[in-house]
Amino acid sequence: MEILISLLVGVMTASGVYLLLRSHTFPVVLGLSMLGYAVNVFLFASGGLTPNSAPLVEHGLSRLPDPLPQALVLTAIVIGFGMIAFLIVLALRALRDLGDDGVDSGDAR
Amino acid sequence: MSHLAVLPVLIPLVAGAVLFLTGGRARGVERVIALAATAALLLVSLLLLVQAADDRVLIYYVGDWPAPYGIALVVDRLSALMLSLAAILGCASLLYAVGGDDRGGRYFYALFQMQLLGINGAFLTGDLFNLFVFFEILLIASYALQLHGGGRERVRAALHLVVLNLVGSSIFLVGIGAIYAATGTLNMADLAMRVAEASPEQAGLLRVGGLLLLVVFALKAALAPLGFWLPPAYSSASAPVAALFAIMTKVGVYAILRVHGLVFGPEAGSVASLVIPLLLPAGLATIAVATLGVLASRDLQRLLAHLVVLSAGTLICALGLGSEAAVSAVLYYALNSTLVGGGLFLLAGLIARERGAVGGRLDEARNLVRPVPLGTLFFLGAVGVAGLPPLAGFVAKLYILQSALGHPAAAWVFGVILGSGLLVVVTLSRAGSAIFWRTGDAPAEGEAAGPLASLSTALLLLGTVALMVGAGPTTAYTRATAAQLADRSGYVTAVMANLGVSPPASQREDP
């Protein structure tokens, strides 16, 4: 389980960083989303992975997952969603105002 | 429990929500709401400053959940000082905007309040994840404010600003995850205790977390090599927005001082003084890069943006000295550089409007409408920001250099700070003569700004005079602040005081 999750986080981070370094805004937006997913899974795993345990608190159960990372991930997902939405609108605005979708477009002019 | 401590978060939140509803339909009413809210904020901040001045640490447990389970807001001397600084800057920028610069966007006042909410929250919170949330609030408000007024330059700078800061947010979350995995807590006071007792196996994870947080805060503080986003963003922003942004780099410096000072301080066991050795070279490099930027700037706003980076570099460099006297000097320098930096951005707005089409470019142009008053203000601001005697900039620089005496790298600190100071004086004189003297005989074509805009600019720039006159009490306060920051156990005891004393109602009902 740990190996699977770490591989997942690693692959998503790597693809996120690769896409982030592209010169057009669309791959950059995708890259930031990938990076966001990787971070959320990492944050979720930071409380320790507890397979086969109850998802909610129940009396008499000793094996419980840590609820705090779940709350943190929920917050992070909401914030990340808002930020990506803003970035998409901004990228479209840049496409309209600057004439192309390059991250550095118009610098030479 | 006094509710005063939560008001700096609540006031802008409520005012901002109301202003989002009105959304630019009743500008007169919005101006009144925004001004009233910010004035109330200033009043509350000053009250907190007075309370903090007798060395009490005021703790507010949000929802009355005891620390470390709930979120605690902590008002100590440092928080109160930064809150007051933000409120003063907010009031002045808002007055300037009311003078006419608010017409570039419907939600200007709402976003302005949200920006203040994020800044105040970041200064108040005692919880690492909550710090992340408030950072995001201030960032998303700043993205939208940076675009205020529209235009190609602003859109391009905003794209870079948003992408970089989104990466920064991801890194922040990874750092928080690593620290939580190692310690199982995110309350800063609780973290300080657990990190001090951390076993060597946990030290690796803690070190990674602490250094990732440093990267994020350095990005906010625009340290080299992470600060290249700042000059385009600040120089393209409208004047009141740029003036408010003058405190944003200080939020980064504050976060380093708070988190790395408290959690990864000299008593932190296996990760003691994690970042102190990195700060001095990073600060010196930032000063060097920013000085080159100042020299190469061809318009006034760009020059001022590089000066903001320079002041952040000086702050970090002084923090790297690691002594209590240096922390005190950092706070005094931060007060002066924020007020003068904000004032100069407002002044640049006034100058650009009076020069007409040339704007802030440092080329030969027509005369200003009111060359003498603006020239006097520019002289005042330039002397204040460059650190020439007798204004507070000089006192602050002297204070920093004094605390560097005896440090092994003192020669580097003296050389870089004094050398950059000389180059800044040269550049500012060149800029001043280009704007005010190389004007030809043609009559002015620009329009003068209203009295409110001029008044707010003058008020901020006179801040450096006030800091010079009040240098005695101010440095006494910053010295006591540095002493309070060095007393980590005092902070921890204050925050954890209620542990086990009053469990919240929901827990009491539990069988």
Image (cartoon, rainbow, N blue to C red):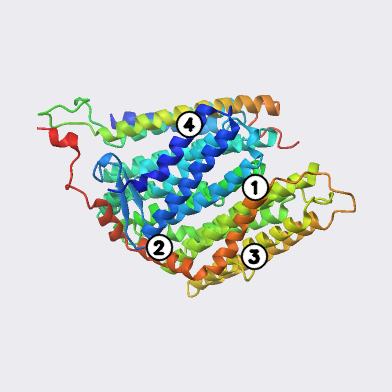
Circle nearer the viewer, 1 or 2: 1
Q: Residue at x 40, y 40 (%)?
A: B10
Residue under label 1? B452
Report the chain holding disc 3. Answer: B
Q: Residue at x 39, y 48 (%)?
A: B124
Within the image, what quadrant is residue B401 found in?
bottom right
On the same chain, marks 2 and 3? The answer is yes
Residue under label 2? B481
Q: Residue at x 55, y 38 (%)?
A: B32
* Camera-nearest residue between B419 and B445: B445
Q: Which amino acid type corresponds to the residue marked 2 in the rendered image?
A: Thr
Horizontal placement of B198 versus B256: left or right?
left
Residue under label 3? B421
Q: Which amino acid type corresponds to the residue marked 4 in the rendered image?
A: Val
Secondary element under disc 4, as helix, strand or loop, is helix
Label 4 to label 2: alpha-carbon separation = 36 Å
Q: Earlier in the sequence, mark 1 or mark 2?
A: 1
Residue under label 4? B18
Label 1 to label 4: alpha-carbon separation = 24 Å
On the same chain, marks 1 and 4? The answer is yes
